[in-house]
Image (cartoon, rainbow, N blue to C red):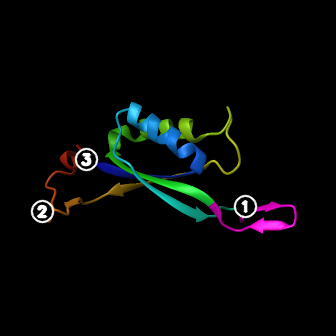
Amino acid sequence: MMIMVRAIVRPEKSDDVLAALMAAGFPAVTKMSVAGRGKQRGIKIGEITYDEIPKTLLISVVKASDRQFVIDTIMEAARTGAKGAFGDGKIFVTPVEEVYTISSGVKEPDIEEAAA
């Protein structure tokens, strides 16, 4: 079984996360610049409230057996300071049911082989 790991991290930490995943043997990652807010509803600095905060979304599909290792790798690389800080991000994990190759239009017969 495969899982999709989506990590929303601080933009200044995304290169650290990508390097950590590469070093750990997980080079396949999609990276997007995004903006949003969490439970804190943005951030207020003085009289100005910023409703949407820039973040980076990293997406990777890995074997379910690698789940915890990948999550731990992302958390360690994305965390600011020894204990982390407010706004370091979130990680979402979901199952992957099917994989298709766009160039051939073929559904991958074995999802384990599709990620290799």
Given the image, on which type of amino acid does mark 1 rest? Gln
Disc 3 vs disc 2: which is toward the camera?
2
In the image, taking residue 93 as reference, residue 103 lies left or right, namely left
Q: In this view, does 89 lie above or below 47?
A: above
Disc 1 vs disc 2: which is toward the camera?
2
In the image, taking residue 44 as reference, residue 25 lies left or right, namely left
For disc 3, the marked residue is 115
* Residue found farthest to the right: 46
The quadrant where residue 43 appears: bottom right
Residue name at image x 54 percent, y 62 percent: 34
Q: Give the x, y percent position of residue 112.
A: 22, 46
Q: Residues within 10 Å of mark 2 (few under 14, many from 20)?
A: few
Given the image, on which type of amino acid does mark 2 rest? Ser
Q: Can residue 105 be seen in this view?
A: yes
For disc 2, the marked residue is 104
In the image, taking residue 101 as reference, residue 76 lies left or right, namely right
Q: Residues within 10 Å of mark 1 (few under 14, many from 20)?
A: few
> Sequence-wise, which precedes: disc 1 or disc 3?
1
Given the image, on which type of amino acid does mark 3 rest? Ala
Q: In this view, does 91 lie above or below 34?
A: above
Q: Are marks 1 and 2 in contact (CB under 8 Å)?
A: no
For disc 1, the marked residue is 40
Secondary structure of the residue carrying numbered label 3: loop
